[in-house]
Image: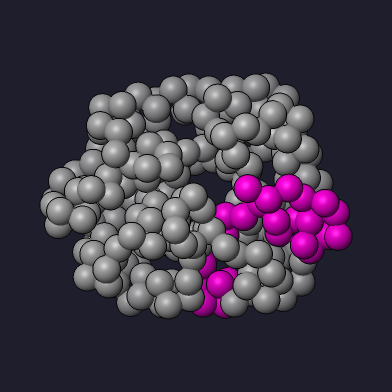
């Protein structure tokens, strides 16, 4: 798999709490130069990035990274992000709802946020490191039934990141309209190739550009 093909699946990511404009601008310049799938940036930078990079595909995060803000707050985050120019939303589910096995409530929230997104892409972060296999399978069902576009493994800020085992589990249990995004801990070329070969459509990482081009890329 060549570098260009790999980079076309990368959500080039900068989500540090202390990310500066220079950090974000560097990320975006790299994304434009190496034609990554998107950049994934903090909501506070979406408007500024859209103004400077009108053609760049922008993803941002909602309910990030803990997921337990109320649904109404997440809806407002989605609306403001889209108004500022975001193309894609990566939301974190209410992990407490999942751990309480209140899957219908989790599904309802996803459905509400997908309605707020409309035709824009919604990726649902289920934070696999905190979930049992039963809970992961239940969330595959919830994401599918709610009409989301992607199921995503991790925030990158939890106790663990993406695993090939979780990607294989997703493939078995998601519906045909749902794609897979891996994030967190995908840091080598071998990792990138393996996750793509297993069926991931996107990989969220801050290191792929540096790894594949030999340029310095800051990790989060």
Which residue occupies 31% across, 47% down? 93
Above or below for 27 versus 83: below
**What percent of the width, then of the height, locates residue 148?**
34, 50
Image position, residue 206 (x, y; %) = 66, 51
Determine whether, in the image, residue 6 is placed left or right of residue 173.
Answer: right
Q: Position of residue 2 (x, y in %)?
A: 76, 71
Q: Residue at x 60, y 26 (%)?
A: 45
- What stretch of residues is rendered in magenta? 195-220
Colour logic: one colour
Question: Which is nearer the eye, 6 or 219?
Answer: 219
Q: Is residue 120 visible?
A: no
Question: Residue lying furthest right in this view?
Answer: 214
The question of residue 63 being in magenta is answered with: no
Residue 28 vs residue 23, the one in the foreground: 23
* Residue 219 within the magenta-colored segment of the rendering: yes
The N terminus lies in quadrant: bottom right
Give the total number of marks visible in the rendering.
Answer: 0
Q: Is residue 112 left or right of residue 11?
A: left
- Among the 4 quarters of the image, the one containing residue 179: bottom left
Q: Residue at 27% x, 72% y: name it.
A: 133
**Does residue 160 appear in this view?**
yes
Q: Is residue 12 above or below residue 119?
A: below
Asked if residue 84 lies left or right of residue 143, the reply is right
Could you tell me which residue is drawn at 52 percent across and 29 percent down?
Answer: 43
On the image, which quarter does residue 203 sit in?
Answer: bottom right
């Amino acid at each position: 798999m060549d570098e260009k093909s790999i980079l076309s699946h990368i959500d080039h990511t900068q989500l540090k709490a202390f990310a500066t404009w220079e950090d974000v601008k560097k990320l975006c310049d790299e994304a434009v130069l190496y034609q990554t799938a998107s950049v994934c940036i903090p909501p506070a930078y979406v408007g500024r990035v859209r103004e400077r990079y009108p053609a760049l595909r922008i993803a941002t995060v909602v309910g990030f990274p803990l997921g337990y803000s109320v649904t109404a707050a997440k809806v407002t985050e989605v609306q403001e992000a889209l108004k500022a120019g975001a193309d894609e939303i990566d939301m974190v589910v209410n992990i407490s709802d999942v751990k309480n096995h209140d899957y219908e409530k989790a599904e309802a929230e996803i459905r509400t946020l997908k309605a707020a997104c409309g035709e824009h892409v919604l990726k649902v972060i289920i934070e696999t490191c905190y979930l049992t296999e039963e809970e992961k399978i239940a969330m595959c069902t919830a994401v599918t039934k709610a009409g989301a576009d992607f199921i995503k493994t991790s925030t990158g800020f939890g106790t663990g990141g993406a695993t090939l085992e979780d990607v294989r589990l997703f493939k078995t249990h998601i519906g045909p309209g749902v794609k897979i995004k891996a994030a967190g801990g995908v840091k080598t070329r071998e990792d990138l190739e393996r996750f793509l070969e297993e069926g991931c459509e996107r990989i969220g990482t801050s290191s792929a550009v540096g790894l594949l081009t030999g340029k310095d890329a800051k990790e989060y």
